[in-house]
Amino acid sequence: MNPRIVNAYKEGFRLKREEDNAFAYLQGVYFRDAIASTIGNVFKKKGAKAVEYPSKPYDLSEGATDDNEYNSGALTEAEKRRKTEMLFGTLRLMQANYELSKQQDKRESE
């Protein structure tokens, strides 16, 4: 094969991998929002504002995602702390459910 063709395939593969990575990241952002708006609201403190799932898709043409808002300082420190606490609370809940399912599987196999 011609080396230029091989390089073109190599570059195409690299671009496809970047595109797949960006898609997986965006999917994770939407999944995080879904978890925060459901499970996070179950465990919110009394009087705390409920987290809502975005009513429309993120505008990718301007790069306006929740993460950019978080890093740009558009959120107050209290909001950042609350979002971080909700994320860790969700992760702890997921870990507890995983541990319970492992224990149940172990009991069923005995």
Image (spheres, rainbow, N blue to C red):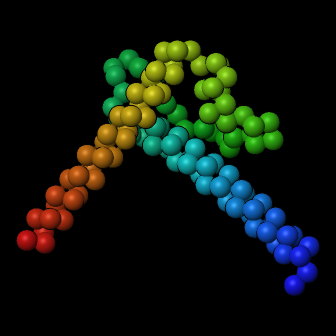
**Up-down relation of residue 41 to residue 47 (above or below):** below
Say left or right for 59 vs 102: right
Residue 59, given in percent of the width and then of the height, sits at 75, 40
Is 104 displayed left or right of 24 in the figure? Answer: left
Q: Is residue 32 left or right of residue 25?
A: left
Which quadrant does the N terminus fall into? bottom right
Horizontal and vertical percent for residue 64?
Answer: 72, 34
Q: Residue at x 32, y 39 (%)?
A: 92
Farthest residue in the front direction? Answer: 3
Please state the horizontal and vertical placement of residue 43, each as a whole percent of the image. Answer: 33, 31
Q: Position of residue 80 (x, y in %)?
A: 51, 22
The residue depicted at 67 percent of the width and 31 percent of the height is: 68
Which residue does the image show at 20% across and 53% down from the upper left? 100
Tell me where residue 53 sits by quadrant.
Answer: top right
Say how many tags the image has.
Answer: 0
Task: Say which residue appears at 91% left-offset and 73% top-offset.
Answer: 4
Quadrant in the picture for the C terminus: bottom left
Is 13 in front, or is 26?
13
Residue lying at the far bottom in this picture: please name it. 1
104 or 20, which is in the foreground? 20
Horizontal side of residue 53 vs 58, given as left or right = left
